[in-house]
Amino acid sequence: MAKKVEVSNLNLRYGDFHALKNINLSIEERSVTALIGPSGCGKSTFIRCLNRMNDLVDHVTIDGSVLLEGEDIYRKGIDIDNLRYRVGMVFQKPNPFPKSIFENVAYGLRVNGVKDKSFIENKVRESLVKTALWDEVKDDLKKSAIDLSGGQQQRLCIARSLAVEPTMLLMDEPTSALDPISTAKIEDLIFELKKQYTIVIVTHNMQQAARVSDVTAFFYIGELIETDTTSKIFTNPKQEKTQNYITGRFG
Amino acid sequence: MNKVVRKYIENSVVSVLFTSSLVTTITVIFITFFLFYEGMGLFREKPLEADFIIAVNKSNTVKKLDNQQIGAVFNQDITNWKELGGDSLPIEILSLYTIENYYSEEDLGEDFSLLPQKINEFLEQTPGAIVCFTKAFMPEKIHGDEIHIDNIELLQFLKGKSWLPTSQPVAQLGILPLILGTLWVSLGAILIALPLGVASAIYMAEVAKPKLRNLLKPVIELLSGIPSVVYGFFGLIIIVPFIQQLFNVPVGETALAGSIVLAIMALPTIITISEDAIRTTPLALREASLALGATRWQTVLRVVIPYSKSGISAGIILGIGRAIGETMAVLMVTGNAGTMPTSFLQPVRTIPATIAAELGEVPMGGVHYKALFMLGIILFLINMIINISVEYIKKGRVGR
C-alpha cells in the first residue's frame, strides 16, 4: 500500500512547553490509524498538525516535516486553505453551523467556489447518503442543523467534510460526546469510509480503537511510544508502557 | 458567634436589600406615573391659553372652530367666513393686536375701562366679527356667541404639522415635525454609525493584533465617558461650520450635523457590543469553517457575522436608542426649527431638545407644560419599543 502521510522528526512547542517530541510516523492509504494515549499526551495536537489547524494557536513553533502525498505541508508558500480543503476534519464536539442542514453540507463547496446548483445538490445528497443521514433528514433539509440530535449532528459534520471530497479525514474523538447507539453508527460509518478515504482517528476508547482501526499509535507525554498493526498492539505490544496502558494500569 | 445575633444580622441584611429594591421600584413607578399623569392631562385641556374667550356675531353660523382654523384666522391666512363653512362675510378681528384699527385710546377710556362695552358694540354691529380677549376685558354679558373649542385630541396632536406652543390666542400643538426631526436625525446617525461601527468591530475582533486591540478598546470605551455637552461643543465648533462650507448652506446647524454628532456618540456602544458578539463566536465554528478550506475572510463573512448578527443588531439598536434620547448635543447643533424636515441640510428640532429648551419657560400646569410632558411620554414609548426589540432580538439568538 502507498504511503499517504510521512511524518518525520516532528517537534511542536507551545511557547516553552514541548508538546510533541520527535514524532516519526507513516500513514498508509485507505487505512484507519487510531491514536491512543492518556489525556494531554499530544494525540489531538498531532492530528491538528496534519491539516495545520495548530496555526490558529498563538506562540506555536513547529519543526520537522509532514509529507502529504510527497508534498511538505510545512514548506513556505503552501496554500493552507487548499490543504484544509484536501484534508477534512471532524471535531470532538459536533459543531454544525447555525444554518440549514443543506447549507451545512454545501458550505465547503460554496466557499471553494462551486456555483453549479445541481452539482451541489447531488453532492449534498451523496454525502448525506454516505453518512446514513439521508433517510432521516431528506424531508427537511431546510431545517436548522441545530435541531438535530447530537449523533445526527456529528454525522452531519462528517457529511460536511465528505462533500468536498477530501483525500484524508481526521477525526478528533468524534464519538466522545455521543451515546452508545450514535457511537455505533459512526463506527459503522468509519468502516464504510475506509474503502475510500485515509482516516486518522483520535480516541480515548480503546475498544473503539480495536474495533475500527488497522494501525494503532500509542502516544505518551508528547512521545510516540509505539506504532503497529492494531491486532499486535492489543495482543502483543513491544513496549511495557503500551502494555500497561492498554491493560488499564494507568491513563 | 451567638446564633441569635447571627440570625438577627442576616435578617437585617435581607431587609436592607429588600428596602433598596423597593425604593428603586417605587421611584421608577412614581416617575412613570408622574410623566403620564402630567402628560395625559393635556387631552382634558383646550388649546386656548388659560382665560381667553373667543366670540362671534350672533348671526354667524360658525359656532365651532378647531385650533388650526383659529390659528389660520388670527394669522389672516383665512379672511372669509365662507372658508370655515359660514356665510360669505369678511372676517374682522378684534383683539389686542388689532384694536387700534378700530378704536383710539380715548374711545377705550382710562385703563381700557370702556373696552368691554366696545367689544359688545363691535360684536353687535359687525356681522363678520370675531373677538378674542382675556376674561378680564370681556363684558360680563357678551352680546355675541362664544366659539366652542374642542379639547386637544391625540390624533390632532400627533399629526399636526406646526409646533407653535406660544402662539396667540391658541397654541398650535402639532408634534409631527418633532417626531420626524427626531427620526431624521436618528436615521442619519444610523446610516453613519452602522457601517463605521460594524467595520471597526470586525477590525478589532478579527484583524487587530492583541496589543493594538488592548489599546483601541479602552480608547473607544472612553468615548462614551465624554459628557454630551462636550460633543455638542465639538459639533458646534467643528462640524457645523464644516457643513456650512462644504454644502454652501446658509446655516450649518442642520439635521446632518445632529446625525454626525449622534453617530459619534453611538459608536462606542455599537462597537463594544458588536465586538463582544463577534468575539464570542465559538472557536468550534471557526475551526469547522477553516477545516473545510474556507479562507479567514470567508469564515468571517459566512460564519462569524451571521452568528453574531443578533448581537450586532442589539448593539446598533442600543446605540441608536441612546441617540434618540440624547438632548444636549443635539440641541446645540441641529438649529431647532420646529418645521417639517425635508432635507438633511435643514435645521430640525427633536423631541428631547424641545423639552429641554422649552420646559424652563412654561407656566406650570398650562397647556404648553402638559404638551411637553406628552412629548416625554412619546419619547418614553419610542425608547420602550427599542428596548423591547433588543430583548426580542437577543431571545432570537437563544432560540436558534
Image (tube, coloured by chain):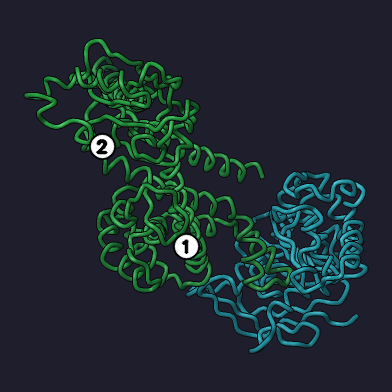
Q: Secondary structure at mark 1?
A: helix
Same chain assignment for discs 1 and 2: yes
> Could you give the CA–CA distance between mark 1 and mark 2, rounded to whole angstroms?
31 Å
The amino acid beneath tag 2 is Leu
Q: Quadrant of residue A66?
A: bottom right
The foreground one among B317 and B347 is B347
The foreground one among A21 and A29 is A29
Measured as percent of width and height from the top left, residue B173 is found at: 38, 35
Image quadrant containing the N terminus of chain A: bottom right
Disc 2 chain ID: B
Q: Is residue A182 left or right of residue A192?
A: left
The foreground one among A107 and B50 is B50
Number of residues whose C-alpha sits closer than 10 Å to that of mark 2, classed few (under 14), some (14–19) or many (20 or more):
some
Which residue position holds label 1? B192
Measured as percent of width and height from the top left, residue B371 is found at: 35, 31
Q: Earlier in the sequence, mark 1 or mark 2?
A: 1
Seen at 22% across and 30% down, the residue is: B363
Q: Is residue B54 above or below residue B250?
A: above
Seen at 92% across and 56% down, the residue is: A129
Give the chain coloured cyan: A
Measured as percent of width and height from the top left, residue B211 is found at: 40, 72
Regarding residue B297, the answer to whether it shows in the image is yes
The amino acid beneath tag 1 is Ile
- Residue A213 is marked as none
Seen at 41% across and 17% down, the residue is: B59
Regarding residue B17, the answer to whether it shows in the image is no
Q: Secondary structure at mark 2?
A: helix
Which residue position holds label 2? B359
Disc 1 chain ID: B
Q: Is residue B147 left or right of residue B168?
A: right
The mark lying in front, picked from 1 and 2, is: 2
